[in-house]
Amino acid sequence: MDNSKIQVLTGMHDILPAEAGIWRAFESAVAEVTREYGYEQIRTPLLEETRLFVRSIGEETDVVGKEMYTFDDNGTSVSLRPEGTASCLRAVIEANYLYDGPKKLWYMGPMFRHERPQKGRYRQFHQFGIEALGFEGPDIDVEIVAVGRALFRKLGFKDGDLSLEINSLGNKEERALYREKLVEYLKKHESILDEDSKRRMTTNPLRVLDTKNPELQEMCEKAPKLIESLGEESLAHYEEFKEYLTALGIAYVENPRLVRGLDYYNQTVFEWTTTELGSQATVLGGGRYNGLIGDLGGKDQPAIGFALGIERLLLLATQKGLINPSEEPDVYLMHQDGKTKMAAFQLAEKLREAGWTVLMHYGSKKLKNQFQKANQSGARWGVVVGESELEKGVAALKDLKGDKGQVEVAMGELPAFLKTWKS
Ligand code: HAM
């Protein structure tokens, strides 16, 4: 029999209890922020038809071209979702959910990309994303950015811990025009291009500007800028977007080379980045994707959204010592077995019904050992139901962290009594 150890898959990870508290704190902050801004939750399957991602994210992107977990399911090609936007639109179109006007949605959950793992880059990772469907903007573009800032603030980040980069990609026609200009320019410099950039020059030339190759930086700096190909309407949208950002006190840096890695973007694009996570610097990325709802078979509507990489944000928060959820119990409940254990069990249930967190003692009968365990648990109070207490119908309550000492309280009154002891 094969009894070798089985390990987690490369690029995937468990979230053990010590870390789970931070995740829950993050999830609570998400619940608050999305409520404050009026976004509704949507939950979609992890598995979709492969062609959904091919048609939305684009065949030539790294995500679809190289990174999807794809397999055949009885003749249908299916893929684990590499991101949330496509599934979200598929669901909304299918349910005709936009029939009575624009909608603002949020989602959270695992995504899958078969990438080379490194710090901040995994094969199963988690995103929190929002999508505003049916809004022209640019006011909503700014709201989307503001949701990100509100979440960062709620988690204890200071403005400036993350920097906002913005750009405008213009509309389809403007980008096509720019693409021609750029390819012409790249062709002139073909002799210095690396293999990746040569391939991208024909498949997705805008992505060449995204290269990390230091030898190409100068050539990229001097390349024609997309913003110079934008028409009046796109420019006005972008200008107004910037004015609103300023009005809300959101600092930004314009990055004319910001193009994003998925094909569906146009007009406004943005990323929140950090210098503290090495090469995986983008914590949140998003932008406008007008036209995509139509391309996927829905009634065409403008749309914009973002997704945040939860692992990256929590890594950064941990590095900065933010988010320290306290998970310590209120009460450690001790007893002397037999009838006292039974009474302690009943008391524990009453305390929990009243909202207190209670750890019941299991194991050694010696009270000294039990008190050691109580202290190790971090509980605020030790409660003992011993034989003498049980006879009197009381519990002995001991303050384990403060200087209130020890008192006897009638068992039935303990849940309420603790409230008065709390301060
Ligand atoms: P994305 O830029 O591909 O956009 O991903 C968004 C964020 O997910 C990234 O900025 C990063 O923090 C995180 N992320 C991506 N890949 C990984 C990975 N392998 N490991 C860890 N974290 C990762 C989207 O997914 C779009 N759907 C965003 C969007 C929504 N645009 C409009 N609406």
Image (tube, rainbow, N blue to C red):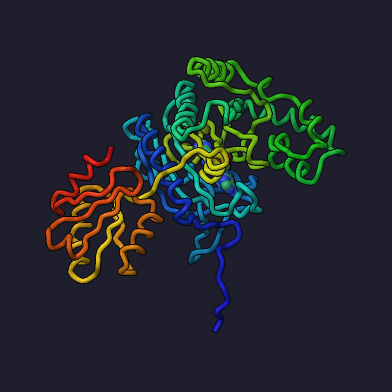
In the picture provided, is 190 more to the left or to the right than 277? right
Indicate the quadrant containing the C terminus: top left, top right, bottom left or bottom right.
top left
Near-viewer residue (71 or 334): 334
Q: Nearer the viewer, residue 365 or 293?
A: 365
**Which residue is farthest bottom?**
1
In this rendering, is residue 365 above or below 352? Answer: below
The N terminus sits in image quarter: bottom right
Q: Residue at x 22, y 54 (%)?
A: 396
Q: Is residue 178 left or right of residue 222?
A: left
Q: Residue at x 46, y 42 (%)?
A: 324
Residue 320 position (above or below residue 20): above
> Where residue 133 sits in the image (x, y, percent)?
42, 33
Number of marks present in the image shown:
0
Write the residue at 64% across / 29% down. 175
Residue lying at 44% horizontally and 32% vertically, measured from the top left: 154
Residue 60, position in %: x, y? 65, 45
* Quadrant containing ligand 1: top right
